[in-house]
Amino acid sequence: MHIITDGLVIKEQNVGESDRLITVLTSKYGVIRAFATGAKSIKNKNLAGTQLLAYSDFVFYKGKDAYNVNSAIEKEVFFGLRSDIDNLSTAFYLADLVGEFAPETADSEELLKLLLNSIYLLSKKKKTAPFIKSLVELRALSIAGYMPDLVACSKCGEFEAETVYFNIKSGTFCCAGCGHPDLSQYPISISTLTAMRHIIYSDAKKIYDFELTPDAEKELATVAEAFALEHTGRHFKTLDFLKSLSIPSI
């Protein structure tokens, strides 16, 4: 059985001296894990198309126990990422994160487009890494069924307030008059709330079309990451590495 599809390599694992086990996010078939025999060799035709973050046209063959890569012709390898370690590390983390939610053998077109567009913007440096990271965290979780309810205060129905408290567990917010800050509730400004609403409720073609002040961007980054980690319930080594880049060396 052969499967012909486009896809983005979101994980890779070396197998032996010359082979790779890759995880590919596809639009029609969800996540496919496949062995790429000899793909690490510089003479192999599938070398570029099976590397991490390569967007390629694949032909997979399903054997008795696993998929194998027959061919992988690269469409985009995002060379621009290689010139900025922060952007590259952010892309690695986002691929890792989206892989948590992408289904197997089911349509993943929306997640794939989100990840591709975001990595493209990072590679072209059209948006900052914190901006893209926060956006993908919130939008990916919303696509996966964890969409926050940000229409109004969950207790009194107030639509806007100068400061609100976002609950990372319930995905709701309370106005300052109703909220009682605890470890699950994060104070955020109306600017950050407006940005979060835009990210989760806007049409996919418009989700990047907004601006934030540096303070609001930091606030959004804090709450989006906390929300993502709360609902994935796991530890990301790619996120640890990304954070280590901002720690000054001694």
Image (cartoon, rainbow, N blue to C red):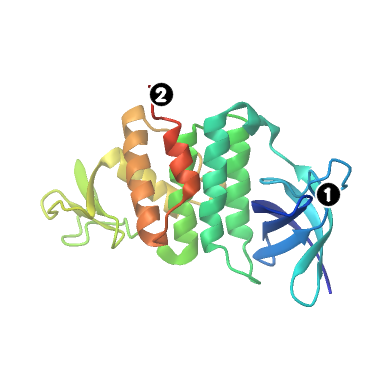
Q: Residue at x 14, y 54 (%)?
A: 179
Q: How many marks do you count on the picture?
A: 2
Using a 10 Å C-alpha cutoff, classify the residue at mark 2 as few (fewer than 14 neighbours), some (14 to 19) or many (20 or more): few
- Circle 1 sits on which residue? 46
Q: Which amino acid does label 2 sit on?
A: Ser
State the SS at label 2.
Answer: loop
Q: Residue at x 33, y 42 (%)?
A: 222
Name the residue nearer the viewer: 61 or 133: 61
- Circle 2 sits on which residue? 249
Q: What residue type is labelled 1?
A: Asn
Kindly tell me whether residue 210 is visible in this rendering: no
State the SS at label 1.
Answer: loop
Indicate which disc, 2 or 1, sits on the residue closer to the N terminus.
1
For residue 4, above or below residue 236:
below
Residue 236, horizontal then vertical, whole percent: 46, 51
Which disc number belongs to residue 95? none
- Judged left or right of residue 198, residue 187 is left
For residue 123, above or below residue 195:
above
Residue 26, horizontal then vertical, whole percent: 68, 60
Residue 74, horizontal then vertical, whole percent: 79, 46
Question: Which residue appears farthest toward the bottom when viewing the image?
Answer: 64
Q: In which quarter of the image is the N terminus?
A: bottom right
Name the residue nearer the viewer: 25 or 190: 25
| Alpha carbon distance from label 2 to label 1 | 38 Å
Using a 10 Å C-alpha cutoff, classify the residue at mark 1 as few (fewer than 14 neighbours), some (14 to 19) or many (20 or more): many
Q: Which residue is drawn at 20% across and 59% down?
A: 157
